[in-house]
Amino acid sequence: KKKKIYFQLIKILESEKIKFDFNSLKILSYAANGSMRDALTLSDQAIVIGNGVIEFNKVNNMLGYFDNKYSIHILELLIYNDSKKIMKIISQLSLNNINW
């Protein structure tokens, strides 16, 4: 179902001449949880946030996802027992309403 939504989004966005990257559409398709209506709503929101373009980083932020680099960095800081920096990163993620 997610693949169908993904390909339908591609078709719609190309016909509307809206720029996007394929990874963003994969994330939107996944976040829609099987609902084409939700996928379209999320896509509309992403277009507004991206000023007419669907961009990977903006979609991630919109959905409250974060880049795995934060996880890796936190693990590195755990190895070095740097709790202050860990708490700083967690605090920043929390301020941005990041869902992890």
Image (cartoon, grey):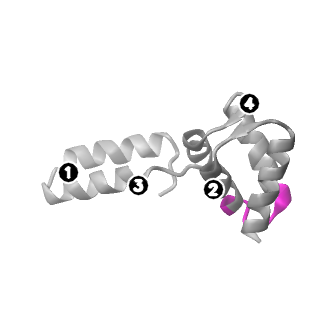
What's the amino acid at mark 4?
A: Gly
User: What secondary structure is marked by label 4?
Assistant: loop
Mark before the other along the chain sequence, 2 or 1: 2
Q: Which residue is drawn at 81% across and 48% down?
A: 41
Q: How far apart are marks 4 and 2 (CA)?
A: 18 Å
- What residue lies at 21% left-to-right and 45% top-to-bottom? 84
Q: Return the residue at label 3.
A: 68
Q: Does the magenta stretch include residue 33?
A: yes
Q: Which of marks 3 and 4 is nearer the N terminus?
A: 4
What residue is at 85 percent from the left and 57 percent from the top?
37
Kind of residue indicated by mark 2: Ile
Q: Residues within 10 Å of mark 3 (few under 14, many from 20)?
A: few
Image coordinates of residue 56 in percent, x first then y, are 58, 44
Amino acid type of disc 3? Asn
- Camera-nearest label, 2 or 1: 2
Nearer-the-camera pick, 7 or 70: 7
Give the alpha-carbon distance from disc 1 to disc 3, as whole Å: 19 Å
